[in-house]
Each structure stands twice: as C-alpha cells, then as structure tokens.
C-alpha cells in the first residue's frame, strides 16, 4: 500500500497522526452529509416524479380539450380567443440551504384571468382547455423548483461521494501506512540503539576486568 514519503522522525510521526485524525474527522462529517443529502434527494425526487406525472396528465387533458375546441369552433376562432390572453406571470426566486446546497423556492404572482375572452363566441370545450392550461401553468413553478433541487442535490451528492471515497480509500490508508512505517522505523532504531548500548557496556566491562587482572 502507498505511503507518504517523509523521513521517519518523531516530529513527522506526530504530524502524520494529527493529519490522520483530521482525515478521519473529515470523513465522519462528509459521511453524515452524504446521508442527509441522500435522504433529501430521495424525498425531492419522489415529489418531482409525482408532480411531473400530474403535469403531463394535465397537459394531455388540456391538448385534448383544445383539439375538441378547434373541431367545434374552428382553428381561427380559437387562435383569436388565445390572443385575448396577454397577461404575464411574475416569478420570484429565493433560496434556502440544505447542507450547503442552495435550494430554490419559486413563487409565481399573477396569471391570465379565468375568462379572458367573450362567452358569446366560444364553447365549453375552450373553457375546459383554458382551465386545464391554467392548472398546468400553476404547477410549473413548483415543478421547476423540484427539478432544480434534484439536480443540485444530485450534483452535491456526487461531489461528496467522491470526497468520501478519496478519504476512505486513498488518504486515510496512506496516513495509516505512513504512521505504521514511522513507528516501525523508530522501534527498530530504538532496538538498535539499545543493542549498541549493551554491546558498549559489555565491552567496557570486559576492558575493566582486563585492567584489574593486570
């Protein structure tokens, strides 16, 4: 296993142990962040999927009603009725944070009136289509909010997962291997020093005994 190329000294051992502790603490923090992001992403993705299905169903119903209106009124009269809808919608976007991820909150203000055209020249099928499209329009800001939240949470989750993997499989093992290497080197050095001192002591004792025998 790879290790960090540093001299096996006691100061480096202390530094490597500190950095190993920081890496382990960082891993714990990121692992908790990953769990929170995963939980939030699953919730938001589930809500987004359900709302998207509802919007598609509403759109299908709206286009079906619009086709019926064109059949009963004629395409030109439907287009003239559509020209009466000229009001725009104002959108306000604010943000709140989820584990450091800016999540949008989208609020729409205003919208087309419920009956933007004269009743005398239209049919109930056009009223149904208008109501269906108005419902779709009311749902679009919420759907956009959820979809953007899903993409941002998923992106942050990917980045967090990469950092967790890097700490778990690269940095922490490298620090552990380096600490083990330095400790082994220092122990070996200490054993050699102890052996050298014993050898020197025995040699001095023998020299002392030889001097006394004279």
Image (cartoon, rainbow, N blue to C red):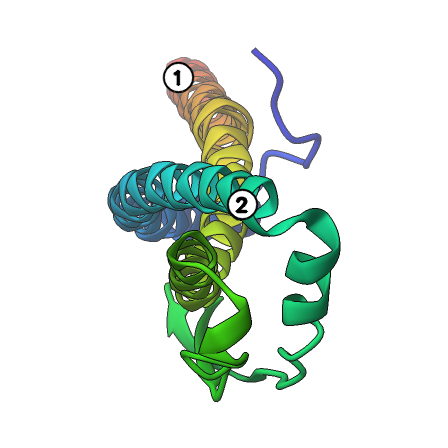
Which quarter of the figure has residue 46?
top left
At horizontal 62% and vertical 78% (from top left) the residue drawn is 85
- Name the residue that disc number 1 marks: 202
Tell which of 43 and 61 is nearer to you: 61
Task: Please provide percent x and percent y for residue 52.
Answer: 40, 42
Task: Please provide percent x and percent y for residue 178.
Answer: 53, 28
- Name the residue that disc number 2 marks: 72
Task: Please provide percent x and percent y for residue 1.
Answer: 56, 11
Q: Is residue 209 left or right of residue 8?
A: left
- Crowding at mark 1 (Cα within 10 Å: few <14, some 14-19, many 20+): few
Looking at the image, residue 3 lies above or below residue 82: above
What is the spatial separation of the Cα atoms under label 1 and label 2, in whole angstroms? 117 Å
> Is label 1 in a helix, a strand or a loop?
helix
At horizontal 36% and vertical 36% (from top left) the residue drawn is 53
> Is label 2 in a helix, a strand or a loop?
helix
- The answer to whether residue 200 shows anywhere in this view is no
- The answer to whether residue 21 shows anywhere in this view is yes
Figure quadrant of the C terminus = top left
- Crowding at mark 2 (Cα within 10 Å: few <14, some 14-19, many 20+): some
Task: Please provide percent x and percent y for residue 69.
Answer: 52, 48
Tell which of 130 and 16 is nearer to you: 130
Which quarter of the figure has residue 97?
bottom left
């Amino acid at each position: 296993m790879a290790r960090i190329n540093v001299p096996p000294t006691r100061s480096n051992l202390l530094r490597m142990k500190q950095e190993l502790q920081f890496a382990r603490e960082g891993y714990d923090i990121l692992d908790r962040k990953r769990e929170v992001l995963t939980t939030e992403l699953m919730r938001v993705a589930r809500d987004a999927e359900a709302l998207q299905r509802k919007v598609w169903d509403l759109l299908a119903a709206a286009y079906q009603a619009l086709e019926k209106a064109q059949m009963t009124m004629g395409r030109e009269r439907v287009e003239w009725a559509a020209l009466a809808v000229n009001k725009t919608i104002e959108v306000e976007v604010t943000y709140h944070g989820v584990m450091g991820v800016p999540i949008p909150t989208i609020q729409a203000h205003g919208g087309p009136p419920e009956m933007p055209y004269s009743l005398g020249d239209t049919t109930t099928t056009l009223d149904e289509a208008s109501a269906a499209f108005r419902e779709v329009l009311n749902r679009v800001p919420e759907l956009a909010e959820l979809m953007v939240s899903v993409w941002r949470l998923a992106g942050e989750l990917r980045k967090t997962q990469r950092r967790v993997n890097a700490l778990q499989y690269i940095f922490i093992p490298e620090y552990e291997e380096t600490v083990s290497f330095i400790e082994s080197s220092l122990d070996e050095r200490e054993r050699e020093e102890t052996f050298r001192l014993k050898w020197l002591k025995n040699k001095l004792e023998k020299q002392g005994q030889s001097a006394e025998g004279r």
